[in-house]
Amino acid sequence: MKLSDFYYELPPELIAQDPLEDRASSRLMVVDTATGELEHKIFSDITEELNAGDCLVINDTKVIPARLIGTKIDTKAHIEVLLLKRKSDSMWEVLVKPGKKARKGCRISFGEGMLIGEITDIVDDGNRLIQFQYDGIFEEILDKLGEMPLPPYITHRLKDRDRYQTVYAKNEGSAAAPTAGLHFTKELLDEIAAKGVEIAHVTLHVGLGTFRPVKVENILEHHMHSEYINVTKEAADTINQARKNGGRIIAVGTTSLRTLESSVGGNGQIIPVSKETDIFIYPGYHFKAVDALITNFHLPESTLLMLVSALAGKENIMKAYQTAIEERYRFFSFGDAMFIK
């Protein structure tokens, strides 16, 4: 399977630069995987697509202000650090730009010395390990100094950092938002629950692995980076009971889907887990846990486009994306949504 099979041409003006004022007013394309038919709705119409007894699975991870701008202590050179994964209280795996200035032993000052970091090692794909020194509570310092790590295709400055969080974000640890969840309001979730739809919370801390470009033409050679997932017993019981009662399991976002597909036991049921996953889903994958997916429109040649192609069928997805371009849908993180059923 070739990387170029997942390419499409996107007019740059269709990349959403700002979130809509009303989260639930995004457009919603409904894709019927059995017939290939497409419907055009508004996101708040998602209630029409959900049935009593279904289980909606949401990722309650919370994005941290993971982008830090600092200076090298010896040369005063400008340096940018993106926190990816916490290794201990004060040790993080990070992405550093420019990497050539961040050799082992390099010391970086943030906030005029409020936070000092030292590069202690270089690990996979050129990522660094950095040991921080500070007085006080790291999270409070990060809240003062850090910026929201918006994807590079978003060039506008985010006025309200809460708009890059879901309304149900709870567990801190992500370097990017689970963006399908950005469309939900508390009122819409209440409406869904009142309809008799179960809502289960899982956690996947989104790292850059999900978004890292695929650089090999043979996609089977691509290596996914691992991300932390957690499924509680309560969530597993809710999901398993819905499945037992004949309800559909509907993942909100590719992160929730990857969490569920990484949590299936030998009996086909979801089991409680707290672990790392590097699951890579592409066409030919046999889904064990998820029946339907709410998602955004993804980048060309991305692992996320491969994932939705596995669920809906590649032809259906490419047709849907072409239609979305013709209909001037908004793409990527702050863009419109798709319901694959």
Image (cartoon, helix red, strand yellow):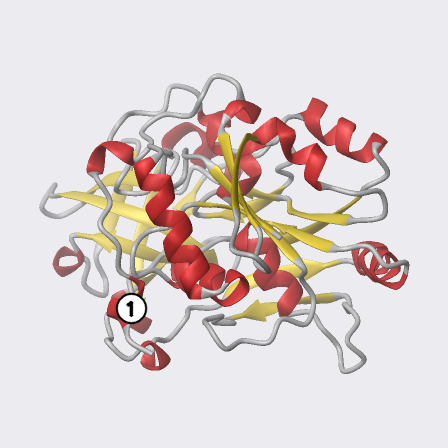
Task: Inspect the image, locate mark 1, and give the three-letter code of the amino acid beneath it.
Answer: Asp
Identify which residue is drawn at 29% across, 48% down. Answer: 81
Residue 280, given in percent of the width and then of the height, sits at 47, 71
Camera sees residue 123: no
Identify which residue is drawn at 60% across, 59% down. Answer: 257
Residue 241, quarter of the rendered image: bottom right
Q: Looking at the rendering, in which quadrant would you find the N terminus?
A: bottom left
Q: Which residue is mark 1?
A: 5
Asked if residue 262 is positioned above or below residue 340 in the image, the reply reads below
Q: Nearer the viewer, residue 41 or 92?
A: 41
Q: Which structural element holds mark 1?
A: helix
Identify which residue is drawn at 27% across, 31% down. Answer: 112
Camera sees residue 175: yes
Asked if residue 325 is positioned above or below residue 37 in the image, the reply reads above
Is 14 placed left or right of 145 in the picture?
left
Is 69 placed left or right of 209 in the picture?
left
Residue 176, given in percent of the width and then of the height, sits at 44, 45
Residue 304, quarter of the rendered image: bottom left
Residue 126, given in percent of the width and then of the height, sits at 25, 67
Q: Classify mark 1: residues with Cα within 10 Å, few (<14), some (14-19) or many (20+).
A: some
Give the mark count: 1
Asked if residue 16 is positioned above or below residue 1 in the image, the reply reads above
Residue 4, given in percent of the width and then of the height, sits at 24, 68
Residue 237, quarter of the rendered image: bottom right
Is 23 placed left or right of 121 in the picture?
right
